[in-house]
Image (cartoon, rainbow, N blue to C red):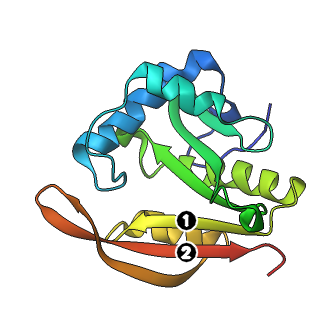
Amino acid sequence: MLNHTSPHAIDNHIRPATRVDLPAILEIYNYAVRELNASFDTVEKTLAEREVWFAAHGERYPVFVAVAKEQVVGWASLSPYSDRPAYGRTVENSVYVHHEHWGRGIGGMLMAALMAVVVTQGFHVVIARIAGGNEASIRLHQRFGFTEVGVMHEAGWKFERWHDVVIMERVIGQ
């Protein structure tokens, strides 16, 4: 078990996700699909779809969960950035926290777990695509050494309006 804690979340801990966590991961993600521009999915995922997604992850591309009082309150994952071989040492991160637990340091705990894996797995670059206006996520990534490298203007249509995507990256060793 990873021992990442936050002063705001003393009873929280981070651990690798298991299949048992998928309903909670799905609930957190589908909230973002329904209510936020944090995900550019516009149709909620099913448990079967999340099972396929989870099976594509593993030791090299892990999924972590944040647990508070025996409940999953957030999750994070690393995914291949692209299937093209030259991108093999570049990953993309995802971090989602249950809306009732925002502002409690859970995102930082999850990011710390991801960044530890990035280093041990020998990845060179981590990419984050963040919906424009998501200042909390931008600040979180900045705290972990990410810098903004560009904006894709009006790249996504959701909630009857266009959304920008801020691209952030961290080159490991910088």
157 relative to 107 in the view: left or right: left
- Where is residue 172? Give x, y as percent: 79, 72
- Looking at the image, the residue that sits furthest to the front is 84
Q: Which residue is at a point 65% across and 34% down the rendered structure image?
A: 56
The image shows residue 112, relative to residue 42, as above or below, that is: below
Tell which of 57 and 146 is nearer to you: 57
Q: Which residue is at a point 36% across and 51% down the rendered structure image?
A: 39
- Secondary structure of the residue carrying tag 2 is strand
137 relative to 134 in the view: left or right: right
Q: Find residue 165 and report its image quarter.
A: bottom left
How far apart marks 2 and 1 lie (CA) works out to 5 Å
- Looking at the image, the residue that sits furthest to the top is 20
Q: Mark 2 touching mark 1, by CB under 8 A?
A: yes
| Residue 128 marker | 1
Packing grade of label 1 (10 A; few <14, some 14-19, many >=20) is many
- Where is residue 96? Give x, y as percent: 47, 46
- Secondary structure of the residue carrying tag 1 is strand
Judging by the rendered image, the residue that carries numbered circle 2 is 168
Q: Which residue is at a point 68% across and 61% down the rendered structure image?
A: 84
Q: Find residue 132 and report its image quarter.
A: bottom left
The amino acid type found where label 1 is placed reads: Ala
- In the rendered image, the quadrant that contains the N terminus is top right
Q: Which residue is at a point 39% across and 70% down the rendered structure image?
A: 135
Tell which of 70 and 38 is nearer to you: 38
Say if residue 94 shows up in the picture: yes
The image shows residue 52, relative to residue 76, as above or below, that is: above
The image shows residue 78, relative to residue 142, as above or below, that is: above
Packing grade of label 2 (10 A; few <14, some 14-19, many >=20) is many
The amino acid type found where label 2 is placed reads: Met
- In the rendered image, the quadrant that contains the C terminus is bottom right
